[in-house]
Image (tube, rainbow, N blue to C red):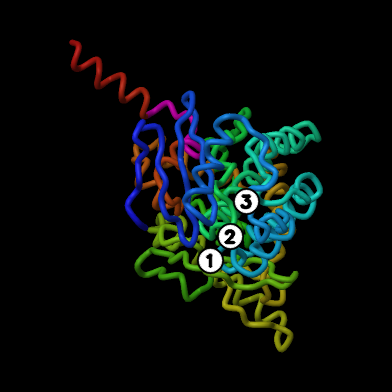
Amino acid sequence: MSAKKRKTNGQGYTYKAGTSYRTVIRCNGKVITAMAKTEQESKRLAKAKASGEVLTSAKDPERSEKALGEYLMHWLETEHRHQIAHTTYLRYRSLAVHHINPAIGHLQLTELSPRHISGFLSKMRESGQGVRSQQQARALLSICLAEAENLDEIAFNPVRKVKNPQGKSKSFEPLNLDEIRRLVRTFEGTYLCARLHVAMICGLRQGEALGLRWTDVNLQESTISVQTQIQYVDRKPTFTTLKTERSRRLIVLTQETVLAIAAQKQIVEKMKLAKGAEWQEWDLVFPAADGTPRSPKTDYDQWQDALKLCGITPRRLHDARHSAATLMYSQGVDVETISRVLGHSTSAITSRLYVHSAEKPIRQAAELLQKVLS
């Protein structure tokens, strides 16, 4: 990139960006940008924007023909899907097909403005779409249009000037220690016991638990290595690698969890004998009756049945993960360690989403303050 050429009045500058020129001007506290093939045209466009002129002849004809919908789908299918988990790709594609493209997909890339993006997100909210869906739609547009900006398809990414949708956080109610004990003791010696352990005590995600293989288990060292998960690609169960380095992790097991997994190994051996030649070997810790990956729906339904049998209020299966984090925190485990056990990219995620109110560390903090003040 060539050196920036600052204007004599100090309000802006023009610089080479790829094969084009970009001019940036500060006007009444706002940043105005424009891009064109020549330095002179770039400056003229920026001045026109700053003065509020309606630009009709300034568009690059090659850029103006590209509509958001076409560009978004091409980028998603040929580029981005190979960089994200399959479930994330499916979610992004659904957002593009059912929400983004019907609303603003017809707009040309060069026409997009923060007002278009903001208006689209408002319509999502008004149609009943949740905050999380709005945030994901904004994220998808932001990543796509950032790439368009890098390739000089647009002068700037309009999503940067649109606030991330906010809303009330979901209220989670993790299981308490008594409920966790009740569940594991009720199902001791059954298939469900070890499954409850890895959910409520180890904090594995459902896909990680259903993709756990015996080669990942070391009962002598009391560890499991979480490296893969089961995802459904084209409706077929497939082992996929966890997407981040921190997601791929080693978990040290409690003695009770070691005993539960050892008992699970014997249960799986009996399942093999019962099926005989019909058994399909996937080396899974939690297989279906024929050795193939267990259905997530079956897994979820049995979780709900277990809660009901133990007289516990229904909760999402993912709330078992919240319970693991809160249980560790209540026993004095620091947030960074909990974050590594759960496989979060940063401890900030753990603190914000998974560590719920726990009296013990708060009481300990008060006692420490009392000692200082006494």
Q: In which quarter of the image is the C terminus?
A: top left
Disc nearer the start of the sequence (3/1): 3
Q: In which quarter of the image is the N terminus?
A: bottom left
The CA distance from mark 3 to mark 1 is 45 Å
Q: Is mark 2 on a helix, strand or loop?
A: loop
Region in magenta: 352-360
Q: Residue at x 34, y 35 (%)?
A: 8
Residue 221 in the image: state x and y as whole percent: 35, 67
Three-letter amino acid code at disc 2?
Gly
Residue 71 in the image: state x and y as whole percent: 68, 60
Q: Looking at the rendered structure, which numbered label has been put on residue 189?
A: 2
Closest to the camera, between mark 3 and mark 1, is 3
Residue extending furthest toward the bottom = 277
Three-letter amino acid code at disc 3?
Leu
Q: Is residue 351 left or right of residue 118?
A: left
Q: Mark 1 points at which residue?
A: 263
Q: Mark 3 points at which residue?
A: 140
Q: What element carries label 3?
A: helix
Q: Is mark 1 on a helix, strand or loop?
A: helix
Three-letter amino acid code at disc 1?
Ala
- The answer to whether marks 3 and 1 mark residues whose Cβ atoms lie closer than 8 Å is no
In the rendered image, residue 219 lying in the magenta stretch gets the answer: no
Disc nearer the start of the sequence (2/3): 3
